[in-house]
Amino acid sequence: MITIEKAILHVLDFHSGVTVYSEQEMDLQESIQTFLQKHIEKSLARQDAQQGSFYPDSACKVKLEAYKNGECSFVAFSQEITKHLENALLHTEDVASTDVLILDAMVDEQRKLILFKCNNHVGYVHQIHQTEQGVQNEIINHYAIMPNLSQRMDEFAIIDMSTLQITLVAKKYPMEGSSVQLLPEIVLECSTQPSQKEALKSLEKTTAEVAESFGQDGVAAAAAAKNYVAEHMEISNELDLKRAGEEVFKDQPAMQADYNRRIEEQGFDQPVQMDQKTTLKKVAKHKLKTDTGIELAIPTDYFDNTQFVEFYNEADGTISITLKHIASIINK
């Protein structure tokens, strides 16, 4: 259950050169509550969200604790955080107008501080003119369209007010010749861990690359990695990429060492918390596309079962795939 206790909206309109900081909280009508609740739900379900922790000397952490302890009002706190974000955006090479929503909410009886960064999108809306000849309806471009309920927030940070742990999605911005994630690196000043999406992608890609570098089948290695995840997620919500590599490259110490080195370079030295239901759905099938344009979606647990699927290396260097024991075929 999600309950919005407080909410405020600040407007950073770099398109017109006008920034407007609200001096009052939003009136939380039912439609606004629904809009915010839906976006909180969608954000918490994001597989590309990273987990973060404040640095000990984080200025944002100090401000947050002052607000939490009642030493600073919600409005003043939100203005400080948004001003920090505005200053950071002004130093980027591609400044986009944005709306900043800051919420104090209860999510399943846990208090959360939420920041939504909504880049302004161009949309088409109607406009009604009263002319001397009568009413004239037109279609115009509008430069401040917020994401609707079927879309996602561009960037966000959800902070647990008890543990101060952070869940966030942040984009990179060009700044002074480098690429910077503004939310974690400048505004929040926190460390980040790889996301669930990054963990799965890295596992599949790295196992394939290691196998191929040792002259083995990269497709089979990636499928074996997915199969490990499918089995492991039935009993745990943590994915240890090093342990996965040990299973995929069992009895192959040189390949394990190469895999571990690559995984550590990517920052996966600790297990990653996963959403079991979503992860199992993602690894249920292994999709293949051949250079001839043929696409296959093979259940992961069938991939290395020669009773159903078999791969052959032909004498001319090509690969043949045989599908077996098919009772019927359905057009889709």
Image (cartoon, rainbow, N blue to C red):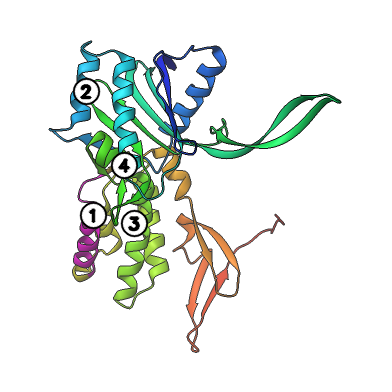
Mark number for residue 202? 3
The part of the chain drawn in magenta is: 255-271
- Whether residue 50 sits left or right of residue 122 in the image: it is left
Q: Is residue 80 above or below residue 281?
A: above
Question: Dot 1: within a 10 Å radius of its alpha carbon, few (fewer than 14), some, or many (20 or more) residues?
Answer: many
How many labels were placed on the picture? 4
Residue at image mark 2 = 63
Residue 263 in the image: state x and y as whole percent.
24, 58
Task: Point out the frontmost of discs 4 and 1.
Answer: 4
Give residue 293's quadrant in the image.
bottom right
Task: Point out the frontmost of discs 3 and 4.
Answer: 4
Q: Choose between 229 and 326: the one closer to the eye.
A: 229
Distance between mark 2 and mark 3 Cα atoms:
36 Å
Counting residues from the N terminus, which is met first, the one under dot 3 or under dot 4? 4
Residue 169 in the image: state x and y as whole percent.
37, 40
Under circle 4, the secondary element is: helix
Counting residues from the N terminus, which is met first, the one under dot 2 or under dot 3? 2
State yes or no: residue 238 in magenta.
Answer: no
Magenta segment's dominant SS is helix
Amino acid type of the residue tagged 3 in the rendering: Ser
Counting residues from the N terminus, which is met first, the one under dot 2 or under dot 1? 2
